[in-house]
Amino acid sequence: MWIPSWVFLVTLSIVSSFGDNTPEPHSSANPEPDEACLMQSGARLRDTDPGSTLALTIPETVLNGKEAEALLNLEGVKRDHAAVVILRVPGLEGEPPRFAWQRKTPGYPAKCMENTLCLFGGSKEPEDTYARDTLVRELREELPEAWREAAVGSLRPYARFVIQAPSKTWRNATEKWRFVVCVFEAVLPSVSGQAGLNAVFEGGWEVKTLPQIADERFCWAYDTPFHSFLRHSGHDTVVALPTGDDRHCGCTATRLLADSDVGVWEGGEDWQ
């Protein structure tokens, strides 16, 4: 049987695209410093979990420990540490998944992040030995009293991400700000009737379904860890969250490999 030559060309193109998951060189002739550093560090696209419906269309960029340290320790960069939690709110059987968020209210030091959604948690303090210590302290400060211990008692580690923020993000900042954020997950008791805006420490408390956050803006690019969590926990078929610089004030978030060693505080957990 005669087969047109174009069939072989198309077949070869498809096989080649699946056989090489290395990202193409950036098209910009003069990439931004952060972008150039990420390229030079050897950061690369690696396969996501088998069976993920987004795996073929949204590959996930990940860093090893050496690559992360190269980004975190550049001259002119302020390095910090943070721990946050993805809070799942159970509903009745058949109801769509819901998640709890903090809404950053006016007065937040990062002006462009006012009215954005943020994961609950915060920055490391000197007395915090591990990321879990930081998060437990923050949750007891930020969450309504009725849900604090439920969140603390159900904490499970998810993954770590390197956040890169331009200097203009934080009020009066002169340095670029980069930090490792340790992302946990937890389950809250039912908060039926509490889905509206409620006052909590440093902002408001909101419970939302995935479609309800599709057009939101996010603090510190925390939409990236959240989207990663959805993808790896089987929720990615519900909604595909759009992305864009205007959604997170120019910040970026890049996932760390599970076995990356970037310090004692970030260790001590079974990261994915």
Image (spheres, grey):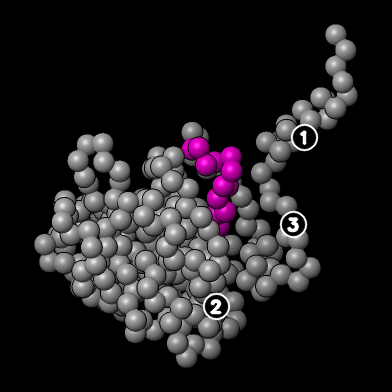
What is the distance, in whole Å, between disc 1 and disc 3 at their CAs?
Answer: 18 Å
- The mark total stands at 3
**Of helix, strand and loop, which one carries label 2?**
loop
**Residue 244: which numbered mark, if any?**
none
* Amino acid found under the numbered disc labelled 2: Pro
**Of helix, strand and loop, which one carries label 1?**
helix
Badge 1 vs badge 2, beta-carbon distance below 8 Å: no
In the rendered structure, the answer to whether residue 195 lies left or right of residue 114 reads: left
What is the distance, in whole Å, between disc 1 and disc 2 at their CAs?
Answer: 39 Å
Where is mark 1, residue-wise?
A: 13
Residue 245 image position (x, y, % from top left): 55, 67
What is the distance, in whole Å, between disc 3 and disc 2 at their CAs?
Answer: 23 Å
Number of other residues with Cα within 10 Å of mark 2, as a class: few under 14, some 14 to 19, many 20 or more: some
Q: Is residue 55 magenta?
A: yes
In front of the other: 127 or 143: 143
Position above or below: 4 against 223: above
Mark closest to the chain's N terminus, 3 or 2: 3
Span highlighted in magenta in the image: 52-66
